[in-house]
Amino acid sequence: SADATFCVPPAKLGIGYPRDLMDLLVEAVGVGGAKDLLFTARVVDADEALRMGLVHMVMPEAELDAAVDAAAQMMADDLAPLTLTAAKAMLAGDADAEALYEACYDSDDYREGVAAFSERRRPEFRGR
């Protein structure tokens, strides 16, 4: 939402910041942005968070529910569930990510996707 604010407050709370979360923060906003957020614990608004790379999209709050619903519907209707599961696991660095990736190529969804592409039609994925 355009009204959202963000803060990385460990320094205000006297707690350490976990390495895995530090890595995610640096990946999102770079070392300089991470230093800024960690060493100042300042609050940033949605527009600044967007410029920093902390968020990837900002919209008015009134549009948020419809945008989330549309994205969820698109994923449910148009994308292969096994592929999404594998991608999510890869992005999270899950131990089973490689196996999930490989399983995509031995799935009914893979065969359906290739057939639909060849036949120039919309695929009907079933998550198998």
Image (cartoon, grey):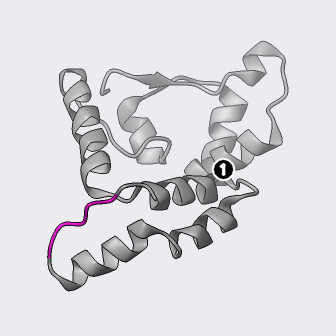
Image quadrant where residue 119 sits: bottom left
Q: Is residue 115 above or below residue 128?
A: below
**Residue drawn at (18%, 21%) of the image:** 62
Residue 122 highlighted magenta (yes or no): yes
Q: Residue furthest bottom?
A: 118
Percent coordinates x, y for residue 92 in the rendering: 64, 51
Image quadrant where residue 96 sits: bottom right
Q: Is residue 27 above or below residue 104?
A: above
**Residue drawn at (68%, 67%) of the image:** 98
**Residue drawn at (48%, 69%) of the image:** 107
Q: Disc 1 designates what residue?
A: 26
Along the line of sight, which residue is nearer the eye, 77 or 52? 77
Amino acid, disc 1 = Val
Left-right relation of 50 to 123: right
Q: Which residues are magenta?
A: 121-125
Percent coordinates x, y for residue 126 in the rendering: 36, 55
- Main secondary-structure element of the magenta-colored stretch: loop
